[in-house]
Amino acid sequence: MPADQPLWLRAVLRVERTIGEPIESAVRSDTYFDLISTTTRVRRKVEGAAEGVSRRCLHMLNLPAGSDIRRMRQQLSRIERRLNQLSHDVSELDDQVPPVRRSQVT
Amino acid sequence: MNPRVPSAINPGDLVSRLNRDVERSILRARNGIRYVRGTNAPPVGATPKDVVWKRDKAELWRYKGGDRRYGPPVVIVHSLVSRSYILDLRPGSSTVEYLTRAGLDVFMLDWGVPDELDADNDLERYVDWYLPRALAAAREASGHDEVTLAGYCLGGVLAALYAAGHEESRVRNLILMATPMDFSEMGAMVALLREGRLNPEEMIDETGNVPADALYSGFYMLAPTTEVAQKATLLENLWNDEFVEGFQAMATWSRDHVPFPGAAFRQLVEMLVRQNILLTGSMPLGSRQVDLGDVRGNVLNAMAERDNVVPPPAVEPVMQIVGDPAHREELRLPGGHVTFGTGRSAFKHTMPKLTNWIIDHSDPPSEPT
């Protein structure tokens, strides 16, 4: 810790380390890892259940749900990716074609 | 005795200290208001450059502003998880600016910000598709047959796989900066995935990518209370415009992660994290096996001694695995994962050593272009 730091800053940095070190070891513990994985799974299940309910309601009203839009966006992305790839392939083929000599032009 | 308390108070000193404190308080108030308002954000990635190649989101930039005296060109391959402007943070604190001013011809391969269109990008797409094309463009733009390829973090893994997996790679020098080889040493960042507590699919969102927020949380959880210390240090130095600018630039970058393409993430978790396959020295890529020992040319393994993202034990095996043992060198640098490449310490230690190594392994200086 540099000696030219004011006392208040040195105190804050010391307190931060005092609190921070145990927190850092806690977030590297098995308990924390289990907590994170359980929380992630529970959150996804809850979101999935809520989405299922809203999807059924929207479908009853003949309206598209978020998941329908998402699926459509994924399909559009796949098509766009394929188009991009084809366009790259064509431009690379173009680059490989030797230039036409003027005498060959009819 | 406390050195901060003088034994006898000199009235002249007292007045000048009072003046200084009043001045600093005014500057603190001004900079504090600007900081809270979020205005006066410093420019990042400001070194002038040309886009010399572009495919999808990937772009190859060639930096301007220096006499290009040394060849082959230096092509930096950035990581897939963060923004490349960390290596060009701000004028006077920029790795690429330093290298450019030293007479090197510097290129940066930036992957952009992936979205749904990039969800299917796997490691083969980066190593066998983007990299060969980008490097061909760099060779053509520079007029050199070879390149010095520098990979940062995960970009180093891509660079090493490319240099090993392509006979025509013509990589004279391969520089791996904070590049993980042994994923069992990566610590808390990957422990959840390594031990199967989380599966890749649970982290991938509806766009098919791992959201940037998830990556930010992973980095944040490495040291959750550090922000308090950083903010307190900022408060003390709020009068100092340069400090505030540097702090803002770094804070902007550290929150500015990019989504990780889903296909590459699945491969990363399965092969690199769970099988720790790089440690075996070879890895399947496409329909072939890439042997990292096949890297030709010089290899520099640069690591940061206080790196808590990719700690030295994760990087050290490069010296046993990549390239020809007779052409491997190691560079241990002070600093952390980010600060060894940017900031005051980087300009004192990392940049001069790195630049000298590149120049020593380049052609003799020619007429500037």
Image (spheres, rainbow, N blue to C red):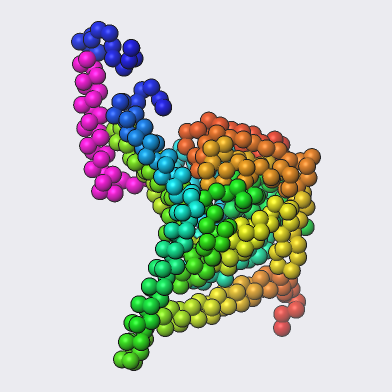
Left-right relation of A10 to B323: left
**Mark count:** 0
Q: Residue at x 48, y 49 (%)?
A: A28
Q: Is residue B327 above or below residue B58?
A: above
Picture quarter containing residue B312?
top right
In this rendering, is residue B355 above or below A34? above
On the image, the x and y values in percent for residue B213 come to 42, 59
**Magenta stretch mostly in which secondary structure?**
helix
Magenta region: B14-42
Q: Is residue B21 magenta?
A: yes
On the image, the x and y values in percent for residue B280 come to: 73, 54
Magenta stretch: includes residue B369: no
Residue at x-position 28% and y-position 14%: B5
Task: Point out residue B177 in the picture as x, y percentages from the top left corner.
Answer: 60, 44
Q: Position of residue B111 (x, y in %)?
A: 54, 59
Farthest-out residue, front:
A31
Vertical arrangement, residue B237 with respect to residue B76, above or below: above
- Identified at 38% across, 36% down, the residue is A18
Dividing the image into 4 quarters, which one contains the C terminus of chain A?
bottom right
Q: The N terminus of chain A lies in which quarter of the figure?
A: top left
Q: Is residue A39 left or right of residue B80?
A: left
Q: Residue at x 30, y 26 (%)?
A: A7
Most extreme residue toward the top is B8
- Asked if one can make out residue A69 in the rendered structure from this viewpoint, the answer is no
Q: Residue A16, can we see it?
A: yes
B137 lies left or right of B235: right
Q: Is residue B367 above or below residue B124?
A: above
Corner quadrant of residue B331: top right
